[in-house]
Image (cartoon, helix red, strand yellow):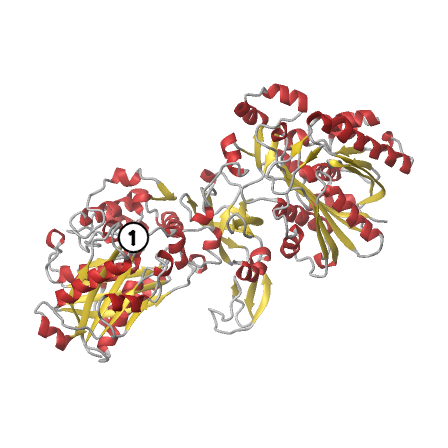
Amino acid sequence: MVGIVGYGSYLPRYRIKVESIAKEWGADPETIKRGLQLYEKTVPGLDEDTITISVEAARNALKRAGINPKDIGAVYIGSESHPYAVKPSGTILIDALGIGPDVHVASYEFACKAGSEAMYVAYSLVKAGEMKYALGIGADTSQGAPGDALEYSASAGGAAFIMGKDNVVAEILFTNSYTSDTPDFWRREHEFYPRHAARFTGEPAYFKHVVNASNALLEKSKMKPEDFKYAVFHMPNGKFPQMAGKKLGFTKEQLEVGWIVPWMGNTYSGSSPTGLSAILDVAEPGDKIFMVSFGSGAGSDGFIFKVTDKIKDIQDKAVKLRDMLDNGKIYLDYGQYAKFRGKIILNE
Amino acid sequence: MISPRYHREIPQRYRLEAGKCKGCGYVSFPPRLVCPECGKNDFDLFKLDNEGKLLTYTIIRVGSDKFVGKTPFAVGIVELKDGVKLTTQIADVNLDELKIGQQVKLVFRKIQDEGKSGLHCYGYKAILI
Amino acid sequence: MREVAVIGTGMTQFGELWGKSIKDIFVEAASGAIKNAGVEHIDSMYVGSMSSGLFVGQEHLGAILADYLGQNPIPSTRVESACASGGAAFRAAYFEVASGASDIVLAGGVEKMTDGADVTDSLATAADQEYEVYQGVTFPGLYAMIANSHMHEYGTTREQLAAIAVKNHKNGANNPNAQFRKPVSLEQVMNSTLVADPLRLLDCSPVSDGGAAVILCSMDVAKKFTDTIVKVKATAQASDTIALHTRKSFTTLNSVTTAAEKAYKMADVTPKDINFAEVHDCFTIAEAVVYEDLGFCEKGCGGPAAEEGRTALEGETPLNTSGGLKSKGHPVGATGIAQIIELHEQLTGQAGKRQVKNANIGLAQNMGGSGASCVINILEAK
């Protein structure tokens, strides 16, 4: 049996409400809340980035897995906000957590599905028998240009998954990926903010890839939506995953637990992984979980998990996603937010 | 270029590695070559506890140029459960809620940047429990 | 060892000396001291400077200053002990004379802080770079943490700290060389900008340019030049951990208590015998703590002492009659020497409106970092 042996997530404490952003741009917050189903989003502290978020998420995963960090054979961090253009994020993480130095490390990038990529490769290496454990992480301090629709959603957070063969808490039964060259969203080298193709990001990009990847995964597994207790899709806003779920035949109840985007925002590479983390926090043995990510450019990775008896032993060993989402919030106004996100030009 | 000295401090700053004197048990953070208590120079690696309490603090409102754009921020002296004391920023805090004696734990954060194109420099910061 | 006397002093105005370089400042102070002493030559010189390398990019200060002072080829050495550099230079000069190696030695100090360097960052090099400064702590920050602890342990109040600034400004108003020659009110101190809570702008000594120099010589030689001899009765120095956090207490400065004990023993006096003192009030809290650690009162009474006027010019132990670092200014390396100059003026009855009655024995306490170095000199009118 190969699957998740430990998982953990991390969300910053800072938040900004849709109202605070809308006010600055003369937008109507009610329209945004209704249209995108977004209310507030996480904001990284001045001292937080993809690496620090990954470290705290992975620390929680290690607490749950209870393994020797030295037994981890690979560390992959998927993000579109790696702090360095050249220099891996994972080297800093392994030295912080006491993993390695006998370890394979890489940074992944595939817009918002870099996290599920990291999970997929970590899983595959363990399955291939290359190593005992592998760590896959999705984390981001997402960028959205001021005044752009993305500014209401681009948030910060991440989740980490240790894949292994012993003491599996969520077995991975099937995987499937679906990829094509679809230029819906991108960020050129040296550019600070991503660009997107507006409504083209919907039907031809998000929905096509999520739905096709999901259908292929259902076909491969010979399962139907009703076989699952939970489903989680990439959450660029509140509306898209609900619509994708509906198209595929999933109910609101199946999506509910993983649908954390209205209060978290879009954590990009951390989006469906943090949703999965929220599900694992409450899952019961035997529950099946359907997860499909989406990364612009474009592609989707799908996973089917089956939760084991062992889940009950580890759920309480680290902080739960919902606790971080609901508690200890520190709200920022737009000025503080602009400072925190480096949108103010300083003399350096 | 700060790479060599930054690299040298990684075990302490990332993993809180200290030295425990084999002679008298004094824990030195960062590790030293000579024990200030008994003068011996033989130490074991000792990993510090990451929880403790705030002994004193201040709010830096005027920082050096390296911390431009970061002020105001809180800095304090924390005594960890194993008795070791260290100076650290206190993150994620409403500055007016700080009090001497508060329980804190150390987390991994970015501490400073080496200018716009240099290294990101990481280490420990305290957060209130 | 031979007895040593201070026979001449010279200093520049302290302040923002835009038109003067570090060389100009030092040469003005040193020439003044040489002229004031009436000596025709000096055998050797020591210059205290904390950070000329960072402030103006000039090291090898001993050499360049001897050159511009026209003293080549005498030996000239720069002494560094952070903010205690001046005190340490004085001590080095003292030993050179006391040992008999030289008869007449100049001890000076200089700092040029306004030439555009990052002063906060430069001063912070006096703390532990890797384990204090790395975290963003500044010198006001370190003393603010001491203040917070002192308030927590002893109930010291904001008003008491402000009273120290008020007193020192009042004294400094009568010092022609002071940077700030104007009194401030308690309200002004209490309402000034927060720098590092609970310390405000008017709790902090300023950024200053300035130089100071004194001439030391053996007692035998001194008698040839002057009748108003000031004797160096004791010199002592002590160290403590560089990082504030390593110490057992944040409210007692061990370097001060240790150096004081040694100095009192060498001078064969007790704190009661000290008529007045110049102490290192880089921040108001420092004066309160040092007053206690010098043994002038019990722990915790440093704040009340200022508030009750016990450290005022007319009080039982006048502190910082010169205006202290707070009002006179704090060109770091020059500070320790400027303290000696105030002692000399008081002991020779030349302090004018700042004159302490019956000034016979004075103490100068000069401190580096958050107290990792402390130099104490005790001088006596002979």
Residue A211 screen position, x and y as percent:
82, 30
Quarter of the image where one finds residue A242: top right
For badge 1, the amino acid type reads Ala
Q: Secondary structure at mark 1?
A: helix
Could you tell me residue C377's position as x and y percent?
24, 66
- Label 1 crowd (10 A; few <14 / some 14-19 / many >=20): many
Q: Nearer the viewer, residue A107 or A315?
A: A107
**Residue, x 72% and y 50% (percent of image)?**
A76
What is the chain identity of the residue bearing mark 1? C
Q: Is residue C274 visible?
A: no
Q: Residue furthest right?
A: A222
Write the residue at 45% across / 38% down. B96
Above or below, A6 relative to C377 = above
Could you say which quadrant of the image residue C362 lies in? bottom left
At a point 85% along the width and 53% down the height, the residue shown is A128
Residue A217 appearing in the image: yes
Q: Position of residue C145 (x, y in %)?
A: 40, 50
**Horizontal placement of C182 versus A49: left or right?**
left
The image shows residue A140, relative to residue C143, as above or below, that is above
On the image, numbered disc 1 is attached to which residue?
C288
Q: Residue furthest left?
A: C227
